[in-house]
Image (cartoon, helix red, strand yellow):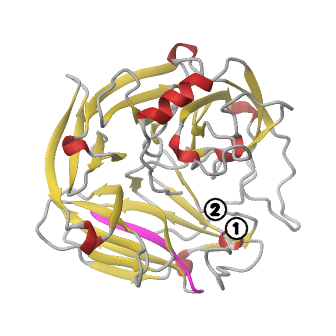
Amino acid sequence: MLAPSRATTMAALRSFMKVSAPGAAALALGLGCARHRGADAAPAMDPVVVEVQACAGVEEGTCLPAPLRAPPVVVGPGRVRVLTDDWASPATSAFRVTEITHDGARFVVAGRCPEQGDEMSLGRLADGASAVLCHSFRAVHFGVVDERLPRIEWRWRQPLPDWTESRISAVPYFVDLGPSVVLFLEIAASKGSTAGWNTQLAPSALPADSLCMGWCKLAALVVTGEKLHTLVLRGNGQGPQEVTIDAKGIRTASDPLKAAQISPGELGEPCVSEDQDGTVTVRLGEYRQLGSYTPNLPLLGESTVATVRYEHAWLAHGPDVFPTERLFCTPRLSLTSSAPTSGDFPTLRKWPRVTLDGEHGLLVYGQPNVDPTNSPGMHASYAGSVRIARFSAGEVTSGQDSAPDQAH
């Protein structure tokens, strides 16, 4: 599932490092993302309990002492890359890319956004290289990770219109289509106008195109060949839409439910998984959890899940789960200890990603350092750490339904 990033501050990071305490909290890993009913329902699963240590430093292998600047990116079996503030640098807009595996954490590259860019995004290109996008007040800067040196090779700068005209609040996603890159521009609501999303080819002098207006949410960005399939969830009872964009920016719109398998199940948020053979699976459920934001928005009906597959595909920002031999969706976390240590609030976890490599399971997510009961005025994204949990993949039993027959 996709979610826009949020800027963090060094002051918030210092606050986190002061209050973090040693110790451990036991977390229950609920590994069934969709609970099926009826005669073919999967048996109930006992949760897998994983020890997640309080953040004590990179050496411990349980966390990175800086907040996530963008969702983690699964780049292979047992490999997850994360973009964080550079905790070793006091410079403004300094960032660090780290690769997390079952064996530990490996430094990839450090850099600094041009023009004091604050909003950042991490993704991968069609050739497998990692790339960083920095969004400053007037432009987007696109850099590719050169791991041999290591350094960031800043390839181009895409100017943006003035905020008073465009209301671009963030550029959290980018997708490489070979000849061009598609940027996703998040539009902030203002008096007399609604929020939404625009897309723009880059580098290019062409103007941005509107993708959706009003309440809309990006569920998945899937690439097949030189075509980008954008799954958009829309409000006001419109249901989902798939917008296909080619390398020249030409669009076609369709109903993704026509190519979906509809089955019983419960799924509160969309989830995206990827297999080693290039199959991407997207799951969409009912919208009940978003009802307060999206009135009159039943998608499929209560306890229903739609599954859409794309073959020979890849994901610029990685899947929620890789591969899908045991899971389609990320697990749920629930705190089992009676007294959590400061900084451990699993219900506030951000952007969980799971990857399995043989018998090794790896869970990476952002952990805000905020107690919502004591700090109601502080947004959970403004401080925290990258949390790392390792578990035995042999303990995971699939609770998913059979793979759908239809595929794109």
Q: Judge by depth and name the residue closer to the eye, 323 or 21.
A: 21
Residue 355 appears at what percent x and percent y? 56, 38
Residue 279 appears at what percent x and percent y? 48, 55
User: Which residue was labeled with disc 1?
Assistant: 289
Seen from this angle, which residue lies furthest left?
205
What range of the chain is rendered magenta? 226-236
Q: Could you tell whether 194 is left or right of 48 in the image?
A: left
Task: Specify the quadrant that holds the N terminus.
Answer: bottom right
Where on the picture, by quarter, is residue 359? top right
Q: Secondary structure at mark 2?
A: loop
Task: Mark 2: give few (<14), some (14-19) or many (20+) Cα within 10 Å.
Answer: some
Q: Could you tell whether 293 is left or right of 254 in the image?
A: right
Please, is residue 108 above or below residue 307 in the view? above
Q: Residue at x 71, y 43 (%)?
A: 374
- The amino acid type, in three-letter code, at marker 2 is Glu
Q: Residue at x 25, y 74 (%)?
A: 165
User: Which residue was labeled with disc 2?
Assistant: 269
Disc nearer the start of the sequence (2/1): 2
Q: Residue 408, can we see it? A: yes
Please, is residue 25 above or below residue 315 in the view? above
Please, is residue 82 above or below residue 88 in the view? below
Q: Could you tell whether 399 is left or right of 90 in the image?
A: right
- The amino acid type, in three-letter code, at marker 1 is Gln
Q: Residue at x 47, y 62 (%)?
A: 220
